[in-house]
Image (cartoon, helix red, strand yellow):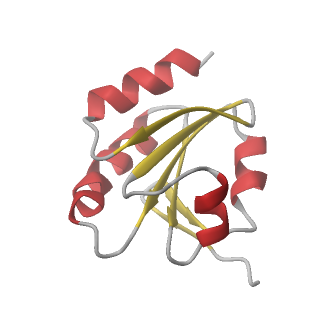
Amino acid sequence: MATQTAETDGVISLGDDDIETVVEDSNVTLVEFYTEWCGTCKRMKPVLKTIAGDTDATVLTADIESNLETAIEFGAQSTPTFVLFADGQPVKQLRGGQTEQTLRDLIAQYSD
């Protein structure tokens, strides 16, 4: 599978081959599993851009339809699903739309 990585306003969009690499290289990583047709996912985009721009966390997005193996591995059965990684390990999963403050508080719990 070809590796695809794109960055838009601090939010990184990754393919199956990349998630583990980026997560291992970051202290705290927030991954959003989404689909293109998900309205809630579209509403989360500006929130993720803001968080990526002013926190130390790495923010990633992964399209479930393009990255099915990774989505299954991390239990993303609905969209959006957020998985927070700390020191390379998944530590928390949230399903559905979240407020910016909820995501910030979650990141702050695991940031040094």
Give whichever of 50, 61 is nearer the camera. 61
Q: Position of residue 56 (x, y in %)?
A: 55, 32
Q: Position of residue 60 (x, y in %)?
A: 53, 54
Where's the N terminus, which quadrant?
bottom right
Image quadrant in which you'd find residue 88: top right
Q: Along the horizontal axis of the image, is 53 left or right of 58? A: left
Where's the C terminus, which quadrant?
top right
Residue appearing at x 33%, y 43% in the figure:
50
Q: Position of residue 48 (x, y in %)?
A: 37, 48
| Count of numbered badges drawn on the protein | 0
- Relative height, residue 49 to residue 30 (above, below): below
- Relative height, residue 35 to residue 97 (above, below): below
Residue appearing at x 30%, y 59% in the figure:
41
Image quadrant in which you'd find residue 29: top right
Query: Is residue 10 visible in this depiction of the protein?
Result: yes
Query: Is residue 15 visible in this depiction of the protein?
Result: no
Residue appearing at x 45%, y 24% in the figure:
106
Q: Along the horizontal axis of the image, is 102 left or right of 77? A: left
Q: Position of residue 69 (x, y in %)?
A: 67, 68
Residue appearing at x 70%, y 38% in the figure:
26
